[in-house]
C-alpha cells in the first residue's frame, strides 16, 4: 500500500465517521474466499467498499469504525500469521502488519472479533451495517444485538437502530480524489491500448475468442485485470447487449463491437469500440455509426457541473431519433417520435452510468426524486448505441444484424468534461485509416 493510497483511505474514514456521529459504530466485512470447485478458488478480489476504506488486500477480514472511541477509531480484524498456511498459500499481513502498513489504530486476530465488537456495541446507539450483502455476517451481527438486548435489565444498552452503511459511504465514493483519478487514467490508458490491439488483429475468419484473448493479454502485460467480462461481438452478436459467449468467427462485410475495460488498483475503465471487420464500413454501417458518434459527442458536452444527470441521455435520445429519421428507419417529426419513444426498439438502454471501483459504480442518480447535478470529480460513461436485430422486418435488410455502440469514460471538471479514454480513432475515416495501417 503506497503512501498516497494510505492517506486517501485515512481521509475517507475520517469523512465517513464525521457523517456517522460519535454514538455510532460501523461494521464492514471484507470479501470471502470463494471456491470454484474442489480445492480451487476463484481469483480473489476485495470488496469495493472495504478496499475503499482500508486498502487491506486479504480475504475474511473485518473493519470496525468507532468515531467516539478514544483508544482508536479504526479497528481491523484479520487472519493471524501462520507458518503452515503461508507455506502453501503465501504470506499473510497479520495484525502487526495491519497496524504498521494499513493505518489500523488497533488490530486483532479474527478469533477476537466477537469479544471486542460485543464490548463496543454496548456503548453504541446507531449501528451502520449493510444488511443483505453478507448473509452469514448478518446472522452473526443480529445475534450479537439480541444478546445485548437480553442483558438490558443489567444496564446494558444495545443499539437502537441499524442504518445502511452504503448510504453515506457510497455518496463519498461518488466523487473521486486526485489520486483516484490518477488510477482511473491508468486503467483507461491500458484499455485504449487493448482496443487498438483488437483493431490490429481483427479480420475475416478470426474468432471472437481470439480478440478477447488479445485484450486480456494487453491487460496482463500491464499488470491489470478485466474490470468485467469482455464483450467481443461480431456481426449480429453486437445486438445482444451483454454478449459474452465470444465463440464465433468474424465475417467479411460485418462490423465488430468490442466492449472491454481494464481494472487497475481496484478502479475500472469501460470502453466500447465498433469497427468494420475487413477495414471498410458499408454505406449503411457508416451512416449508423455517424449517428451514434454525433449523439455521443453531444452527450459528452453535457457532462458539466450544474447540469442534470439525465441531460446526456435526453441529448442522445434526440440525436439518435433524428438520425433514425435521416436513415429512413423512422418516419415523422423527430420531436413527436421522441415523445412516442419510437427509438426504443433500436436504442433500449441508458446513455451511461457512474464509473469507479465498480464498473457500474455506486452513487444515487436522483436526490429526493430529482435527477442530481454533476459535480467536479464525478466520472461517468457515455455510451449511446443503435441495434437492429437480424430478424427485424421493420428495418431495411441492409441494416439487419448491425449493432453499433461507442463508449468513453468522462471526468467532470470545473472547466468541463474531460475524456479519460481519449486516444482511439473514433470517426469512420480515422478507423478505416488505422485499419489500413495495420
Image: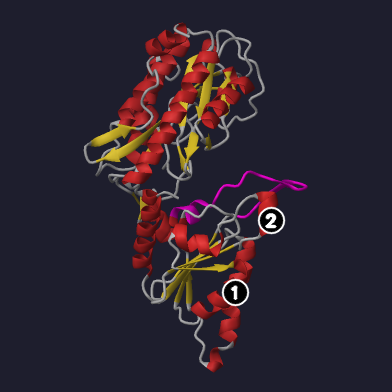
Residue 333 image position (x, y, % from top left): 34, 23
Residue 47 falls within the magenta-colored stretch: yes
In front of the other: 182 or 88: 88
Residue 312, image quadrant: top left
Question: Please, is residue 116 above or below residue 272 in the view?
Answer: below
Q: Which residues are magenta?
A: 32-52
Residue 213 falls within the magenta-colored stretch: no
Q: Is residue 434 left or right of residue 85?
A: left
Residue position marked by numbered label 1 in the rendering:
114
Q: Is residue 405 visible?
A: no
Gap in angstroms between the C-alphas marked 1 and 2: 23 Å
Residue 301 image position (x, y, % from top left): 28, 31
Number of numbered markers: 2
Considering only order in the chain, which callout, 2 or 1, is on the residue closer to the N terminus?
Answer: 2
Residue 68 image position (x, y, % from top left): 38, 75
Residue position marked by numbered label 2 in the rendering:
85
Amino acid at each position: 500500500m503506497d503512501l498516497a493510497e494510505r492517506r486517501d483511505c485515512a481521509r475517507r474514514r475520517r469523512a465517513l465517521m464525521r457523517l456517522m456521529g460519535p454514538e455510532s459504530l460501523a461494521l464492514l466485512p471484507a470479501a470471502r474466499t470463494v471456491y470454484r470447485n474442489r480445492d480451487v478458488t476463484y481469483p480473489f478480489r476485495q470488496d469495493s467498499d472495504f478496499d475503499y476504506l482500508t486498502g487491506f488486500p486479504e480475504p475474511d477480514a473485518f473493519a470496525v469504525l468507532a468515531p467516539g472511541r478514544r483508544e482508536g477509531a479504526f479497528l481491523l480484524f484479520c487472519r493471524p500469521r501462520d507458518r503452515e498456511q503461508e507455506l502453501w498459500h503465501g504470506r499473510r499481513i497479520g495484525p502487526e502488519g495491519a497496524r504498521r502498513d494499513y493505518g489500523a489504530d488497533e488490530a486483532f486476530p479474527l478469533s477476537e472479533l466477537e469479544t471486542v465488537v460485543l464490548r463496543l456495541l454496548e456503548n453504541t446507539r446507531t449501528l451502520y451495517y449493510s444488511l443483505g450483502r453478507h448473509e452469514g455476517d448478518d446472522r452473526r451481527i443480529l445475534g450479537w444485538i439480541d444478546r445485548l438486548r437480553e442483558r438490558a435489565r443489567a444496564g446494558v444498552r444495545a443499539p437502537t437502530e441499524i442504518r445502511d452503511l452504503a448510504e453515506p459511504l457510497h455518496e463519498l465514493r461518488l466523487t473521486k480524489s486526485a489520486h483516484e483519478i490518477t488510477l482511473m487514467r491508468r486503467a483507461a490508458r491500458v484499455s485504449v491500448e487493448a482496443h487498438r490491439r483488437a483493431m490490429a488483429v481483427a479480420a475475416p475468419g478470426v474468432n471472437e475468442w481470439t480478440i478477447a484473448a488479445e485484450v486480456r493479454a494487453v491487460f496482463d502485460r500491464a499488470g491489470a485485470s478485466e474490470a468485467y467480462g469482455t464483450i467481443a461481438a461480431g456481426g449480429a452478436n453486437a445486438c445482444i447487449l451483454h454478449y459474452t459467449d465470444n465463440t464465433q468467427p468474424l465475417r467479411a462485410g460485418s462490423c465488430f463491437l468490442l466492449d472491454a475495460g481494464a481494472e487497475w488498483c481496484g478502479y475500472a475503465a469501460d470502453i466500447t469500440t465498433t469497427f468494420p471487420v475487413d477495414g471498410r464500413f458499408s454505406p449503411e454501417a457508416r451512416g449508423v455509426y455517424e449517428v451514434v458518434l454525433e449523439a455521443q459527442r453531444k452527450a459528452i458536452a453535457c457532462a458539466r457541473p450544474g447540469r442534470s444527470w439525465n441531460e446526456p441521455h435526453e441529448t442522445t435520445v434526440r440525436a439518435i431519433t433524428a438520425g433514425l429519421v435521416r436513415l429512413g428507419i423512422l418516419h415523422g417529426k423527430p420531436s413527436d417520435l421522441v415523445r412516442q419513444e419510437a427509438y426504443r426498439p433500436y436504442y433500449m438502454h441508458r446513455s451511461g452510468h457512474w464509473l469507479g471501483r465498480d464498473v457500474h459504480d455506486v452513487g444515487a442518480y436522483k436526490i429526493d426524486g430529482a435527477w442530481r447535478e454533476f459535480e467536479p470529480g464525478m466520472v461517468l460513461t457515455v455510451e449511446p448505441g443503435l441495434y437492429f436485430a437480424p430478424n427485424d422486418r421493420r428495418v431495411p435488410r441492409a441494416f439487419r444484424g448491425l449493432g453499433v455502440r461507442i463508449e468513453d469514460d468522462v471526468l467532470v471538471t470545473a472547466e468541463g468534461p474531460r475524456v479519460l479514454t481519449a486516444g482511439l480513432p473514433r470517426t469512420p475515416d480515422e478507423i478505416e485509416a488505422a485499419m489500413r495501417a495495420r
